[in-house]
Image (cartoon, rainbow, N blue to C red):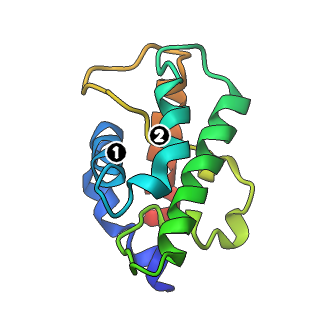
Amino acid sequence: YPGEWLLDLPLLGKSYADFSREAFDMAVLPVRADLSQEWRALSAATDPNADADEMTARRLAESFAAYLKACKLDERALSTLPPGRFLMPGDLEGSPALTFAPLPGLSERRARSGSLQAMMERRYEAYRTHVVK
């Protein structure tokens, strides 16, 4: 397996809220803040409780993937960039399995049915179950 795919193994033990919290914690580190600025701004302007919308999910996922790719290409040699399939999608290119992104300020409580957060959680869980495992 490519190394990027192996980076996903720790996701098996993380909830979507944990994944989101850790992604934002990493994104604001001084070495990554400039690379993540666009994705963080888009995320901050998004209401996780809003109705699920495919275009919003796609914009967030594309922006998050662009941030991960920028980290990988940066001369500061950043590592630990899950989900690895965002960097090397293989046969999943353009798939709903890769159309999720972390959302800010999530709690562990259950997301409202039909919300963007619920959609992202389902896709994250599907990614963990069907791609990572």
Instruction: Say how many tags the image has.
Output: 2
Marks 2 & 1, CB-CB < 8 Å contact:
yes
Q: What kind of residue is marked 2?
A: Arg
Q: Residue at x 56, y 34 (%)?
A: 42
CA neighbours of label 2 inside 10 A, class few (<14), some (14 to 19), many (20+): many
Residue bearing mark 2: 40
Secondary structure, mark 2, is helix
Q: Secondary structure at mark 1?
A: helix
Q: Nearer the viewer, residue 40 or 96?
A: 40
Determine the residue positioned at 72% across, 62% down.
93
Question: In the figure, 105 relative to 115: above or below?
Answer: below
Residue at 38% over, 73% down: 7
Image height of 76 relative to 58, above or below = below
- Pinpoint residue 79: horizontal percent, then vertical percent: 36, 75
Mark 1: few, some, or many residues within 10 Å (few <14, many ≥20)?
some
Any mark on residue 24, and which? 1
- Please identify the quadrant where the C terminus is shown: bottom left
Picture quadrant of residue 109: top left
- Which disc number belongs to residue 85? none
Residue 13: image x %, image y %?
25, 55
Residue 82 location (% of width, % of height): 42, 63
